[in-house]
Amino acid sequence: MIIKGKVHKFGDDINTDDIIAAKYLISTDPKELGSHCMESIAPDFVKQVSPGDIIVAGNNFGCGSSREHAPVAIKGSGISAVIAKSFAAIFFRNAINIGLPFLESPDVENIKEGDLVEIDLASGIIKNLTQNIPYKTQGFPEFLQDLIEKGGLMNYIKEKENKNA
């Protein structure tokens, strides 16, 4: 699976309240949540996102409270993947559940706001097309790629059950 998009850059310790403020947690609708994604730290973020774009961030992305709303908001805003130096464990799990690809890379400081980046999930190759620089990280196992293509864990399970019925 290949993902290609423009970079939106963030720093370290982006918490779930930064991603989606608690006042919006009354909704579970991805588009509604996405329309408020990052608004407390980057008010024009959603106006600048095009479908398929990519978030690049520093250490501990998605820290804070355990809320699946955070990766849902990111995906609902049009972001197709997140690359960070590291992720909070709970964000990692929630991103898998909703089918949001994420990659850890120590090279994020070399990727700039607005760069065009291409990710090959199978090989773990991140290509900064703007700077013509490749980075290697761990690829996604086939079953995780399949889960992402199906839109998350629930869709993945439903399809598996339908095949076995």
Image: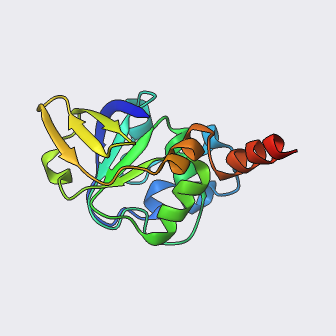
- Residue 60 visible (yes or no): yes
Residue at coordinates 36% horizontally, 50% vertically from top-left? 139
- Residue 34 visible (yes or no): no
Residue 136 is situated, as x and y percent measured from the top left of the image, at: 22, 49
Quarter of the view holding residue 84: bottom left
Left-right relation of 37 to 121: right
- Say how the picture is coloured: rainbow
The quadrant in which the C terminus is found is top right
Of residue 119 and residue 87, the one placed in the foreground of this image is 119
Left-right relation of 100 to 105: right
Residue at coordinates 20% horizontally, 59% vertically from top-left? 106
Residue 2 is situated, as x and y percent measured from the top left of the image, at: 39, 32
Quarter of the view holding residue 1: top left
Q: Residue furthest front?
A: 164
Residue 49 is situated, as x and y percent measured from the top left of the image, at: 40, 32
Quarter of the view holding residue 85: bottom left
Of residue 81 and residue 43, the one placed in the foreground of this image is 81
Of residue 113 and residue 46, the one placed in the foreground of this image is 113
Q: Residue furthest right?
A: 165
Residue at coordinates 46% horizontally, 28% vertically from top-left? 51
Residue 140 is situated, as x and y percent measured from the top left of the image, at: 42, 50
- Total marks placed: 0
Q: Is residue 157 above or below residue 121?
A: below
